[in-house]
Image: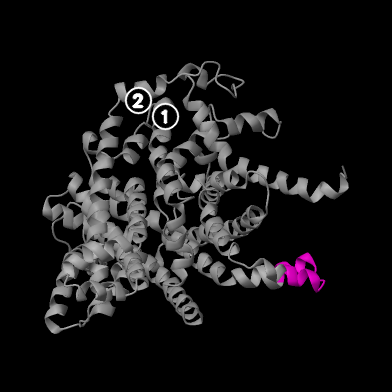
Amino acid sequence: MLQKKDNIMGFCLLIPALILVSMLIFYPLINAVYLSFRSQLIYELKGRFIGLANYIEILQEEEFRNALSLSIIWTAANVIAQVLLGVSAALLLNEDFKGRALARALVLLPFFMPTISIALMWKWLLNESCGIFNYTLMQLNIISKPISWLGNARSALFCVIYIGIWRFTPFVIISILARLQTIPRELYEAAEIDGASKWSQFRYITLAEIKGVLLVVILLRTMFMFKKLDMLLILTNGGPGTSTQTLPVLVYKSAFAAMRLGKGAADSIVILLIVTIFVILYMRITGKSQEEV
Amino acid sequence: MNFKKNIPRICLYLCILVFVLYSVGPIIWMLLSSLRSKTEFFNIPPTIFPKHFTFINYILLFRETNFFHYLLNSVYITIGAIFISTLFSTLAAYSLTRFNYRGRNLFTIFSLFAYILPSVLLVIPLYLLAMKAGLIDKLTGLMLAYIAICLPYCIWLMRAFFRSIPIEFEEAAFVDGAGRLRTLFSIVIPLALPGIISTTVFTFTVAWNEYLFALVFLNSDLKLTFPLGLNNFVTQFDTYWEYILSGSIIVAIPAVIIFSLAQKSLIKGWGGGGIKG
């Protein structure tokens, strides 16, 4: 049924998408690599070739090392906490109880709200002069005077991580809960009859069943958190100082605050390389489970 | 009543209650705050429930600021991005799953790779491109950027859906003498509706939330989308909490409604479906 003429028509259906993807993704990607070998300021029409100078600068500068270690802390803390909290919450929400549908809907809200709403909301809650957070802590005599939580180098990183966990845990909950619901009840009943303890039921049935999804979720969360930029820009803009300046924030600052597009491009290529490692892992794992299914 | 027997039950309810409060407590506090007058914001001690419920902040937001403009800009860009990326990705995915030509697989793999690309990498070259094309500070430029971000994943999603639709339906239509395009629009697209819902929700999420590209592309106040508009209520001298809180609630309403309606097909898209590729 599939003839040559037909295939030409089929290719025509791809053309609109092909043009947009080539122009707006493929070409920019190549251009980013090209830019990373050049020095170009934002108001210049043309830059000049400087070879590996941008990359050598990256290897030598303190700012990049700081950003890289902040990125690792930010990503690791977020992913670990989101997974632990998300799996626990999914297990709770998988139990039978009154009001389950409502509880499930409510816990997803942080993830469904627009980024700007939740970022500004947390600024309001943590606000120095009238935030509920400071007020409560002062009432409980934990602190004696209001703290500027996001304006203080020591607490800012802790706060943005807490907000990241609060916002993105629902992603883990949805994914794990969807999988938990497909585990047949008979498995637990059989284990019960065999006299298996609750713990070994969890260990050998629940955990074994969700292992595949869990791995994918961990990888996805790691990639997403590593790339995360908008929330940090709104909450702290990398500050105070450079205390929350992760790699993506550094790219933004290099390119659009310091106006060095070439340096920014080089920074972003490093991010791409790191993310690519996780992509390859992801493809391996999903490819494997595809064979198993 | 056996109290001891009920202890695990009570613990369960308690844990769930704590977790629900942890999740929605901040949002409820924001909602309650937005419903009090500005003078009540700084009351010490803060009143949990506003003394006088009032919509004054919401009214002033629309009367005194350009918020309505920001909202319209966002709606325009979001609808445009949804329409184009859904249409193009549907056509492309149909082409990729039903026809045979060289480079098909390469394009598919590149689509997945493109989805993972950090947007911060694309923003620099796309900014230069928009400069050359005269699309800086234009809503169309921003819409194009959002389509670029969304299209690869939409293609990937639609491709998975088309693959799950048995080809026999189309063959039956062929036998009845329907042409390729007619089969596509009358048989395949109705069957792929869950996929189309997924791409719509995905594109909506990106376009409705996006901050970085808007920040880099837009300059003039009347062109801003709401994430920038709302953030601009934090000024060097004063923070207009009354506008920020009420505006944040308003823009959250469509997002929460759309997510709640589409939850099921969404989970398929990134939970189970994502694993099966």
Rendering quarter of residue B257? top left
- Magenta-highlighted residues: A189-203
- The residue at which mark 2 appears reads as B61
Res B82 seen here: yes
| Kind of residue sitting beneath label 2 | Leu
Q: In the drawing, what numbered circle is on residue A98?
A: none
On screen, residue B231 versus residue A88, left or right, reads left
Residue B263 colored in magenta in the image? no
Residue B42 appears at what percent x and percent y? 53, 21
On screen, residue B252 versus residue A41, left or right, reads right
Res A35 seen here: no
What secondary structure prevails in the magenta region?
Answer: helix
Q: Are marks 1 and 2 in contact (CB under 8 Å)?
A: yes
Q: Are marks 1 and 2 on the same chain?
A: yes
- The residue at which mark 1 appears reads as B246
On-image quarter of the N terminus of chain A = bottom left
Chain ID at mark 2: B
Mark 1 surroundings within 10 Å by alpha-carbon count, few (fewer than 14), some (14 through 19), many (20 or more): many
Nearest to N terminus: mark 1 or mark 2 = 2
Name the one closer to the observer, A7 or A134: A7
